[in-house]
Amino acid sequence: MDKFRMIFQFLQSNQESFMNGICGIMALASAQMYSAFDFNCPCLPGYNAAYSAGILLAPPLVLFLLGLVMNNNVSMLAEEWKRPPGRRAKDPAVLRYMFCSMAQRALIAPVVWVAVTLLDGKCFLCAFCTAVPVTVLGNGSLAPGLPPPELARLLARVPCPEIYDGDWLLAREVAVRYLRCISQALGWSFVLLTTLLAFIVRSVRPCFTQAAFLKSKYWSHYIDIERKLFDETCTEHAKAFAKVCIQQFFEAMNHDLELGHAHGALATSPASSAAPATANSAEEEKEKLRGITDQGTMNKLLTSWHKCKPPLRLGQEELLMGNGWAAGGPRPPRKEVATYFSKV
């Protein structure tokens, strides 16, 4: 259990590296899925384009949604978007920054799928086999004599070598090489464009909007850390609440059972020595409750946190003037606090 706890804490503290690793795994999985996928073109004029469009677009959409679902910040973004304004206004720039950060990672696997599909050429061959210029690549003198439906039916069978019977009009190998060449050109162009776009978004954009970028990044990290701290505080409170409830239950049962005097006399000596420690432990647990000692009050607190979060303005009893304290007295002792890192 300690090893699993250490691994979990490491993943929490290195969330950006963890999410990048997940995105890389999904990208490799998408390429492996395509290589294992059995591509069967229907070789019919009315179905080739629809089948190819489904193969090219449906899996990337599924991979994109999976990338969003596997991101821990999706629920945080939805909560921040749908929460009532209360005493804290919602900043659309922060929401856009959070969504763009998640979308950039979630788009890696779909981009890999589209690139691999275009570079392979089977999907493009199935979709555009009926658009091959027969007059240029084949026997142009025979093409005008065929009715358009018959020509489309004949060209739609180009992806299927076992049923293609139009070598007298157009050699199948010529059509396959022609369409795969175009598909690979489109694939490499797509890779180049996505790489340039990623470079612009990650490197160039912050240089022109540095102030807005820093503000959005800071407050998105603040929302992430605030949520983690609130969850940890609620977990600590729930643990203390449960412990006090169980202790009170056992004390009540012990009182109701009314143990005999002989047994009570035997248990007196160890109980007396353990009494101060038990009392101190109970006092510490009650301090962790922070005055919230019943279910109704806790429900009101959670509802209030959702509807009316505290404003982002900290009250200070003593203001700083220059490098010293306004009160002129010694500085208050520093308190150690835990540090949380957020990589949204």
Image (spheres, helix red, strand yellow):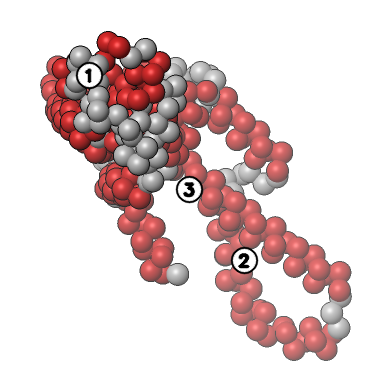
Q: Which residue is mark 1?
A: 134
Q: Which residue is mark 3?
A: 232
Badge 3 element = helix
**Which residue: 68% across, 85% down?**
269
Of residues 60 and 138, the one nearer the viewer is 138
Q: Name the mark on residue 334.
A: none
**Which residue: 48% across, 41% down?**
230
Name the amino acid, label 1: Val
Name the amino acid, label 3: Glu
Quadrant placement of the N terminus: bottom left
Of residues 244 and 74, the one nearer the viewer is 74
Is residue 333 visible to the viewer in this orientation of the structure?
Answer: no
Contact between labelled residues 1 and 3, with CB atoms less than 8 Å apart:
no
Q: Which residue is mark 2?
A: 279
Q: Nearer the viewer, mark 2 or mark 3?
A: 3
Instruction: Point out residue 195 in the picture as x, y percentages from the top left corner.
Output: 16, 30
**Which residue: 38% across, 46% down?**
37
Q: CA distance from mark 2 to mark 3?
A: 25 Å
